[in-house]
Image (tube, grey):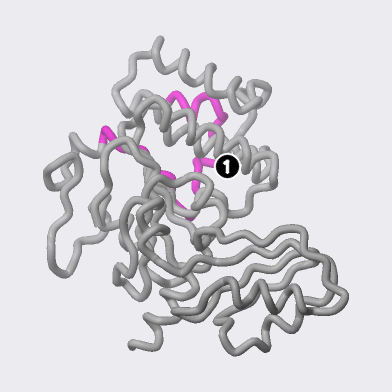
């Protein structure tokens, strides 16, 4: 896998695929059994670590410390001056709407507040590379949106962002590039747009009122996902969408509002490639 500078890169895969292990190898926490890993064009060293921000999946802060003291400690440990550290701590507490907790101990904060403080500790030194392991895990919708907004702000400033997730919908909204791994092996990797283009299996989105269950019984349909007022259908290789449209028009009691060919979703690619990889093994 290769991560171009300045992208938001999704490291994707099912639970147990090896996402966290891969991240820990990139950071030098684990050593690979074979091969090599270069960060900023060379093997990991202390100078490279100072250019990285890392948010682990297992969150952990010094619970007895006051929030401001904790963040100042992290900022100073990255070489920031007292003045610069204080300005950044104050600025980020304002940005995440938590200036009122500066004098509280970490253990007095809610889980959501602690997650925000953990994020601040990761980005105080303005890293060039930000590595986030399952950053959206356990977040409520408001904090989820805040996290996403901050990641996009950092990306727009030129920060390269790598984040692991098994949430395909969030990855599809945010990523420029992806790497899908399963059982420790890369099964799909590259620019997200090109991955979707090269995948080849376009889906058909049907917005309709009436019975759609019959779609699952058509022998030329590979997969049909049914929802309340629409369906997403993928045809067997070589089948024309016109055949499906004809069958829909002939279906009694069905009103069709939209019949549209769309690129495959990342979720569909994920499911098919992981299934295929499992069968190969």
Residue 213 to residue 127: above or below? below
Q: Which residues are magenta?
A: 50-72
Q: Is residue 166 visible?
A: no
**Picture quarter containing residue 93?**
top right
Q: What residue appears at the point 13 percent right and 47 percent down from the top-left corner?
A: 43
Q: Which residue carries the number 1 mark? A: 115
Q: Quadrant of the N terminus?
A: bottom left
Q: Quadrant of the C terminus?
A: bottom left
Q: Which residue is at 26% across, 43% downward?
A: 4
Observer-nearest of 112 and 62: 112
**181 in relation to 116, above or below:** below
Considering every residue shown, the one lying at the far right of the view is: 253
Magenta run includes residue 186: no
Q: Position of residue 98 (x, y in %)?
A: 64, 26
Up-down: is 45 above or below 12? Answer: above
Q: Is residue 69 magenta?
A: yes
Report which quarter residue 253 is drawn in: bottom right
> Seen in the image, is 219 located left or right of residue 269?
right
């Amino acid at each position: 896998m290769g991560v171009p500078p300045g992208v938001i890169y999704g490291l994707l895969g099912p639970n147990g695929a090896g996402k966290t292990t891969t991240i820990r190898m990139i950071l030098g926490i684990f050593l690979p059994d074979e091969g090599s890993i270069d960060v900023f064009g060379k093997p990991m060293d202390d100078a490279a670590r100072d250019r990285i921000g890392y948010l682990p999946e297992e969150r952990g802060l010094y619970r007895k410390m006051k929030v401001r003291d904790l963040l100042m400690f992290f900022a100073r440990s990255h070489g920031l001056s007292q003045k610069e550290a204080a300005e950044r701590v104050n600025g980020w507490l304002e940005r995440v709407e938590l200036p009122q907790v500066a004098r509280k101990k970490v253990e007095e904060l809610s889980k959501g507040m602690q997650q925000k403080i953990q994020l601040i500790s990761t980005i105080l030194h303005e890293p060039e590379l930000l590595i986030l392991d399952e950053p959206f895990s356990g977040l409520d919708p408001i904090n989820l949106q805040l996290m996403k907004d901050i990641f996009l702000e950092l990306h727009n400033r030129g920060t390269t962002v790598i984040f692991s997730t098994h949430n395909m919908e969030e990855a599809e909204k945010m990523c420029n590039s992806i790497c899908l791994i399963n059982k420790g092996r890369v099964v799909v990797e590259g620019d997200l747009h090109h991955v979707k283009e090269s995948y080849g299996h376009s889906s058909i989105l049907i917005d309709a009122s009436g019975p759609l269950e019959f779609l699952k019984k058509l022998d030329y349909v590979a997969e049909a996902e049914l929802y309340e007022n629409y369906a997403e259908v993928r045809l067997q290789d070589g089948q024309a969408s016109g055949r499906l449209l004809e069958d829909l028009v002939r279906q009694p009691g069905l009103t069709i509002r939209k019949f549209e060919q769309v690129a495959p979703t990342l979720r569909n690619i994920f499911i098919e490639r992981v299934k295929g990889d499992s069968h190969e093994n």
